[in-house]
Image (spheres, rainbow, N blue to C red):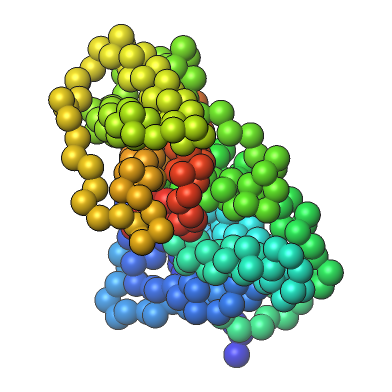
């Protein structure tokens, strides 16, 4: 029996709605295999849906064989971008697994990165495999998903993460689907934080340049910055030494962003006061430190939640600002290790 290519079994991607409808008859089970393995996309065909799927797929520019059972579909640019990130996620997970098993000094951090990679790969939809079963060598196919060398080390893992965050930044800035752009932006921040966990010099953290702000912040984001400003002013007033210096620096940064945004107009969503948390993160953490952590993590999440389709430089600025906020939360003792910060499917 001649195998047939799974031309309409691509995983969810930032394609237009009509394109996604072409794949609605199938399901993909990303994450059902280890990160180092190739997740299979097996189409569960439904009677009566084939004609609609063919019509919608044709509208998306996908070839359905054109006379040869071995020809693969033409992959849209947005799907190719998604698949490239899924492949990089697979490499990161595979490399992290090798480093974790080495028992070295940073094996625990590498293990956490491997676990996060499985969540990230699932969110991306897995690596595309056009064939459900092995095929003759004469058939057109795709390259296997990348995997780490048996002797991969921490430097290799940092390299994989920094390569990936560059890809994710570019993808987020160019992606025309809002939810997918936010996913890519979350990946960029998560991989940046993971790389800095292994090597503090791996990624530069700059934050928002208030003097370069070109348009007013969205109301919800302005409120997040103002709530952080308020919280850190309160914390600074009750702190001393290093904690007070840190809080005062945080206030200076947030005030600059707020002032620059207000000067550009937009909705003023600031409040006269903001409530402090009523319960500390744990018995060893004060309410003030808990407040500082929560405030900065809220800024990180809100920055990423505001990422817009095809945002270009604005998206990259949001990624920089979210990364800075996460590092400020870390400075106050937060883990800031969410696999996809600020993202919900």
x then y, percent, for residue 257: 38, 20
Q: Is residue 221 positioned above or below 80 on the image?
A: above
- Residue placed farthest to the top in the image? 263
In front here: 336 or 245?
245
x then y, percent, for residue 27: 40, 74
Q: How many marks?
A: 0
In front here: 235 or 70?
235
- Residue placed farthest to the left in the image? 272
In front here: 299 or 2?
299
Which residue corresponds to the image point at 51% horizontal and 42% vertical from the top-left? 331
Q: The C terminus lies in which quarter of the figure?
A: bottom left
x then y, percent, for residue 227: 27, 32
Residue 147 visible in the snapshot: no
Instruction: Using the rendered view, name the quadrant where residue 139 is placed.
Output: bottom right
- Residue placed farthest to the bottom in the image? 1
Q: Along the horizontal axis of the image, is 311 left or right of 235?
A: right
Which residue corresponds to the image point at 50% horizontal and 79% vertical from the top-left? 32
Instruction: Using the rendered view, name the quadrant where residue 225 is placed.
Output: top left
Which residue corresponds to the image point at 33% horizontal and 29% vertical from the top-left? 237
Q: Is residue 209 positioned above or below 320 on the image?
A: above
- Residue placed farthest to the right in the image? 151
x then y, percent, for residue 85: 58, 54
Q: The N terminus lies in which quarter of the figure?
A: bottom right
Residue 32 visible in the snapshot: yes
Q: Is residue 261 positioned above or below 132 on the image?
A: above
Which residue corresponds to the image point at 63% horizontal and 76% vertical from the top-left? 37
């Amino acid at each position: 029996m001649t195998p047939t290519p799974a031309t309409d079994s691509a995983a969810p991607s930032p394609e237009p709605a009509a394109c996604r409808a072409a794949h609605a008859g199938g399901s993909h089970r990303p994450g059902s295999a280890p990160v180092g393995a190739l997740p299979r996309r097996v189409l569960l065909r439904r009677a009566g849906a084939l004609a609609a799927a063919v019509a919608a797929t044709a509208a998306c520019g996908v070839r359905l064989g054109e006379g040869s059972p071995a020809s693969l579909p033409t992959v849209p640019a947005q799907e190719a971008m998604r698949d490239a990130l899924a492949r990089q996620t697979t490499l990161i997970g595979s490399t992290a697994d090798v480093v974790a098993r080495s028992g070295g000094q940073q094996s625990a951090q590498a293990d956490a990165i491997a676990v996060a990679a499985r969540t990230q790969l699932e969110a991306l939809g897995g690596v595309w495999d056009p064939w459900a079963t092995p095929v003759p060598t004469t058939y057109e196919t795709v390259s296997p998903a990348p995997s780490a060398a048996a002797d991969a080390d921490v430097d290799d893992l940092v390299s994989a993460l920094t390569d990936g965050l560059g890809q994710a930044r570019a993808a987020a800035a160019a992606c025309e689907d809002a939810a997918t752009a936010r996913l890519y932006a979350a990946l960029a921040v998560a991989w940046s934080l993971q790389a800095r966990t292994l090597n503090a010099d791996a990624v530069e953290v700059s934050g928002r340049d208030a003097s370069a702000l070109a348009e007013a912040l969205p109301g919800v984001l302005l409120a997040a910055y103002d709530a952080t400003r308020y919280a850190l002013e309160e914390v600074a007033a009750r702190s001393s030494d290093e904690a007070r210096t840190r809080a005062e620096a945080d206030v200076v940064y947030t005030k600059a962003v707020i002032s620059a945004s207000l000067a550009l107009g937009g909705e003023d969503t600031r409040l006269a006061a903001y409530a402090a948390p009523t319960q500390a993160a744990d018995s060893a953490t004060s309410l003030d430190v808990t407040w500082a952590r929560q405030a900065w993590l809220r800024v990180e999440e809100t920055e990423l939640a505001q990422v817009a389709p095809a945002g270009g430089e604005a998206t990259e600025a949001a990624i920089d600002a979210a990364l800075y906020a996460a590092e400020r939360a870390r400075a106050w003792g937060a883990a800031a290790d969410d696999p996809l910060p600020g993202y919900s499917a």
